[in-house]
């Protein structure tokens, strides 16, 4: 064999890729070697188990039992849910909650969008306006309720003082069926309108100015631009605010509790005269912690969850469908 053929064979053998090594068939890695990482994330899971999973499971078990916190626990089966379905007071609480939620949420979201549009148009003191708008949402709900109870007081409230000063009759704000709901709706609107306005303002900031410039060149007016460009591009933010406002509004508790009290044994008009301000969560608190009927309170809590979930799902579907 010549040296030239040997040289060609040597070059071909060097250019040939090496044979793949067989895959290792040894035992899998021991997961305990990652114990430092497990220890690092364990506090969250421990806290979630103690303050999340355990209360959830215990309340589900408690809903099928009767217990006042002292006496022995007795099995009740579905009796408490059957009683809840026939409970006229709970039905009244559901109706009150839905009415107050509608009266507060619809004007609040419309006002928030308008305020966000005005904030987006200003050029100076934007940070100051944002802080002022955000302050009510981080203020104590109890303090806000006490303040509104003072200004809407039937005898010496500031609102009635203004009305009588204008020659108008005073209004029994904290005594009437609808006026109680108006006070609660105004309170909730004042507290959360700024928070939602900040969310809408952040969404407006994400919309490119080129879109508005193109609409202006096409001859679109301010109203047409707002309806055809601003609202469609803000739909993800609108969907978020609608769902969050639904979940929060249907769980109203502190506002009527501070304004009207919750202990029905002391105050038969818990939730205000005629129970016009009695909400679902306030009724749950009354049964569970004032009457010490923890089993029935747990059943009410799950009913509240079901109502909130249904309304949140309906709002999500309606808002998401408008995007198509």
Image (cartoon, rainbow, N blue to C red):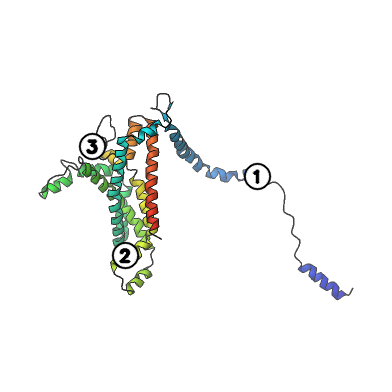
Please report the residue visible at 53 percent of the width from the left and 45 percent of the height from the top.
41
Quadrant of the rendered structure where residue 273 is?
A: top left
Report whether 147 appears left or right of 82: left
Q: Residue 132, percent across and down?
A: 29, 54
Question: Disc 3 and disc 1: Cα gap in Å?
Answer: 66 Å
Could you tell me which quadrant the N terminus lies in? bottom right
| Residue 125 at least partly seen | no
Q: What's the CA distance linking mark 2 and mark 1?
A: 59 Å
Q: Nearer the viewer, mark 2 or mark 1?
A: 2
Circle 3 SS class = helix
The reply to whether discs 3 and 1 touch (Cβ–Cβ < 8 Å) is no
* Label annotation for residue 30: 1
**Picture coordinates of residue 303 (x, y %)?**
38, 39
Alpha-carbon span between mark 3 and mark 2: 43 Å
Q: Residues within 10 Å of mark 1 (few under 14, many from 20)?
A: few
Instruction: Kindly indicate whether the residue at mark 2 contacts the one at mark 3 (C-beta within 8 angstroms).
Output: no
Front-lying residue, 212 or 268: 268
Question: Residue shown at 37%/55% (left/top)?
Answer: 319
Which corner quadrant of the image does residue 92 belong to? top left
Q: Which mark is residue 226?
A: 2
Tell which residue pokes out farthest to the left in this image. Answer: 167
Q: Is residue 12 visible?
A: yes
Q: Which residue is mark 3?
A: 274
Nearer to us: label 3 or label 1: 3
- Image quarter where the C terminus lies is bottom left
Q: Earlier in the sequence, mark 2 or mark 1?
A: 1
């Amino acid at each position: 064999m010549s040296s030239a053929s040997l040289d060609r064979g040597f070059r071909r053998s060097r250019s040939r890729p090496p044979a793949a090594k067989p895959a290792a068939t040894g035992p899998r890695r021991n997961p305990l070697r990652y114990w430092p990482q497990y220890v690092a994330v364990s506090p969250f899971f421990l806290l979630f188990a103690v303050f999340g999973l355990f209360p959830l499971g215990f309340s589900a078990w408690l809903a099928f039992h009767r217990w006042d916190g002292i006496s022995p626990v007795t099995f009740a089966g579905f009796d408490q849910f059957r009683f809840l379905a026939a409970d006229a007071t709970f039905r009244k609480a559901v109706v009150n909650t839905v009415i107050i939620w509608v009266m507060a949420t619809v004007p609040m979201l419309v006002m928030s969008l308008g305020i966000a549009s005005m904030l987006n148009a200003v050029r100076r003191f934007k940070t100051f306006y944002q802080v002022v708008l955000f302050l009510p949402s981080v203020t104590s709900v109890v303090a806000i309720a006490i303040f509104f109870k003072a200004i809407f007081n039937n005898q010496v409230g500031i609102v009635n003082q203004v009305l009588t000063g204008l020659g108008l009759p005073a209004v029994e704000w904290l005594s009437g069926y609808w006026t109680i709901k108006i006070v609660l709706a105004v309170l909730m609107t004042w507290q959360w309108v700024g928070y939602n306005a900040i969310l809408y303002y952040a969404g407006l900031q994400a919309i490119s100015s080129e879109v508005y410039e193109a609409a202006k060149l096409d001859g679109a007016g301010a109203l047409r631009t707002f309806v055809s460009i601003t609202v469609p591009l803000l739909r993800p933010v609108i969907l978020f605010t609608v769902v969050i406002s639904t979940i929060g509004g249907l769980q109203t508790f502190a506002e009527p509790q501070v304004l009207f009290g919750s202990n029905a044994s002391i105050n038969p008009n818990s939730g205000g005269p005629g129970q016009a301000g009695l909400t679902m969560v306030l009724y749950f608190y009354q049964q569970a912690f004032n009457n010490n009927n923890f089993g029935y309170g747990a059943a009410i809590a799950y009913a509240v969850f079901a109502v909130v979930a249904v309304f949140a799902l309906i709002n999500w579907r309606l808002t998401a469908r408008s995007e198509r």
